[in-house]
Image: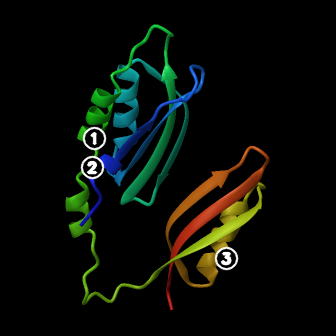
Amino acid sequence: MGILSDDVVLIQLGNDPGQPSIITVNCPDKPGLGCDLCRIILEFGLCIIRGDFSTDGRWCYIVLWVEPNSSSCRVDWESLKNRLLSVCPSCLVSYYFTQPSSNSSQPSLYLLKYCSVDRKGLLHDVTKTLCELEFTIQRVKVMTTPDGRVVDLFFITDGM
């Protein structure tokens, strides 16, 4: 079970000389993983021009747009991929140890997606309402777009 190591780190080279390359990492999460990945990329002479990090605390999906620091910089992409793989936790170990027990009576985890125009105090108001409805908030992911909209993902369990 789990996923093949070839799918953990994917590198898509830019089609044109001025176009950035895209590095995608999809693996179990661990504290400091994003920092380790970025440090390795910078050690290979690349500049991270954009990044997108997503995690639920157990699994992460990271996309980084990179380009060489200078036009004379040559990158050994295969070595970079191997170094990035070396800091990623093992997929097989994580798969087997995070499986829920079949006799466990843990409450179901629900995902609530909330989209709105952003305003001061919005997160407070939504969390207060969820608590009043006796939901337990396990995790929250807040994303604000440049045009002032917000997408909040609440991972909740029903307290009733």
Residue at 34% of width from left, 50% of height from top? 7
Q: Distance between the Cα atoms at labels 2 and 3?
A: 43 Å
Q: Is residue 5 left or right of residue 127?
A: left
Residue type at mark 2 is: Ser
Mark sitting on residue 85: 1
Per the image, the residue denoted by label 3 is: 129
Residue at 67% of width from left, 64% of height from top? 124
Residue at 28% of width from left, 45% of height from top? 88
Q: Position of residue 61 (x, y in %)?
A: 44, 51
Residue type at mark 1 is: Leu
10 lies above or below 58: above
Helix, strand or loop status at disc 1: helix
Instruction: Evaluate if marks 1 and 2 touch, with contact meaning CB atoms under 8 Å apart.
Output: yes
Q: Nearer the viewer, mark 2 or mark 3?
A: 2
Of the numbered discs 2 and 3, the one sitting upstream in the chain is 2
Front residue of 71 and 121: 71
